[in-house]
């Protein structure tokens, strides 16, 4: 099968593409490469595919022709970025997503797998949330994902099948590592500073999922029979992988030698708290076989941080912190305030 992966050079995409290739699929990539200067380790660590360098807002129908499925990962990636520029977040995550899906449908592509998020649940009003729970996003990022789902389902018909993959909070090592994700952040802080630093009161619930398992879920959604996935939303993760933040911190403390849990002075509760039931994906998407736990993931991160020699300046500097990196690109004039390139990505100085 020929599959177009948007965001193929991103945190998840750089891990997803090799997995799809190993499964026998031909992958084409589409990415503006906003984080061209954020590869952790050698550039050769990024997968090599036929690719188009394009902002998702500028995609043409010719960019999508000739494939059997689209896996749409590209977007503004998290709550802090969404809070910084909510209007850009909506333009990219909602409007550009719906436009891309419309072009895919026009081009005769039958399967559109959308990387949504458990952030659509936001401040959950139920003890456990399922795919039928009432969404309650509390950030522009979560709202943008929910709005995209709403408009994508309107495109569904006998010729076009959208699938909504509501991933739990991601973690795991990648050539495009992100340190703004809870397990990655806690482990990096512990490795470089000896403290497992908790910024909240540690009580919020978070469902977590390794990026390899997100990729496996996407692959299963592409390969599944149409009647299994048509217009369906799936919570991506495992029901057993819901933790309070302080529990994740304890896992990291046990993993990283000579580290100790610390709380930020005057820490406040985080209203983003939810436990996610992943029974549906386990029951119906038979190709999805998750392989990771938070404990194993913390061990993986520690091994990589140790092997590469992660430093405090790298961890806290702008190169690998998504929000700081984008602010640096704006300040240098490499991108404008709508995050469109003004120079060649390779020339970026941030």
Image (cartoon, rainbow, N blue to C red):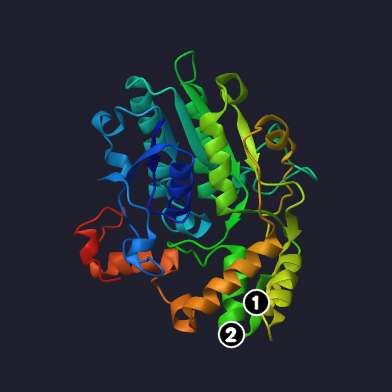
Q: Disc 2 vs disc 1: Cβ atoms closer than 8 Å?
A: yes
Q: Which mark is residue 323?
A: none
Image position of 239 (left or right of 46): right
113 sits left or right of 196 in the view? left
Residue under pointer 1? 197
Residue at position x 46%, y 42% in the image? 20
Q: Position of residue 231 (x, y in %)?
A: 56, 24
The residue at 39%/62% (across/down) is 45
Examine the rendering and report whether any part of residue 175 can be seen.
Answer: yes
Q: Nearer the viewer, mark 2 or mark 1?
A: 2
On the question of residue 202 being in view, the answer is: no
- Front position in the image: 347 or 89: 347
Residue that carries the numbered disc 2 in the rendered image: 193
In this view, 235 is above or below 300: above
Residue most toward the right? 127
Q: Where does the image place residue 292, in percent across and percent down from the top left?
A: 66, 55
Which image quadrant is residue 267 in? bottom right
């Amino acid at each position: 099968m020929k599959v177009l992966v948007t965001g193929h050079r991103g945190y998840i995409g750089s891990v997803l593409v090799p997995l799809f290739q190993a499964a026998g699929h031909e992958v084409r990539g589409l990415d503006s490469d906003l984080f061209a200067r954020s590869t952790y380790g050698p550039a050769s660590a990024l997968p090599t595919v036929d690719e188009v360098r394009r902002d998702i807002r500028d995609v043409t129908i010719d960019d999508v022709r000739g494939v059997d499925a689209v896996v749409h990962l590209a977007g503004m990636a998290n709550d802090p970025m969404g809070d910084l520029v909510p209007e850009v977040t909506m333009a990219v995550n909602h409007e550009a997503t719906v436009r891309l899906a419309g072009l895919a449908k026009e081009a005769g592509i039958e399967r559109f797998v959308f990387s949504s998020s458990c952030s659509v649940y936001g401040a959950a009003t139920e003890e456990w949330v399922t795919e039928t729970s009432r969404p309650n996003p509390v950030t522009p990022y979560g709202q943008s994902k929910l709005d995209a789902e709403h408009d994508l389902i309107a495109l569904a018909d006998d010729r076009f099948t959208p699938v909504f993959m509501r991933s739990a909070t991601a973690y795991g090592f990648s050539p495009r590592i992100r340190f703004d994700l809870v397990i990655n952040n806690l482990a990096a802080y512990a490795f470089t500073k000896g403290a497992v630093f908790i910024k909240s009161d540690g009580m919020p619930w978070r469902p977590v999922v390794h990026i390899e398992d997100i990729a496996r879920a996407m692959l299963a959604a592409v390969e599944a029979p149409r009647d299994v996935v048509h217009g369906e939303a799936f919570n991506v993760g495992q029901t057993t992988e819901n933790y309070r933040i302080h529990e994740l911190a304890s896992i990291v403390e046990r993993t990283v030698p000579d580290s100790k849990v610390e709380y930020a002075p005057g820490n406040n509760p985080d209203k983003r708290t939810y436990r996610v039931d992943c029974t549906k994906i386990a029951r119906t998407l038979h190709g999805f076989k998750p392989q990771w736990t938070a404990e194993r993931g913390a061990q993986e991160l520690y091994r990589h941080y140790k092997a590469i020699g992660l430093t405090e300046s790298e961890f806290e500097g702008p190169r690998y912190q998504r929000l700081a990196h984008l602010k640096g690109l704006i300040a240098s004039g490499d991108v404008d305030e709508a995050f469109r390139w003004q120079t060649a990505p390779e020339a970026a100085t941030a």
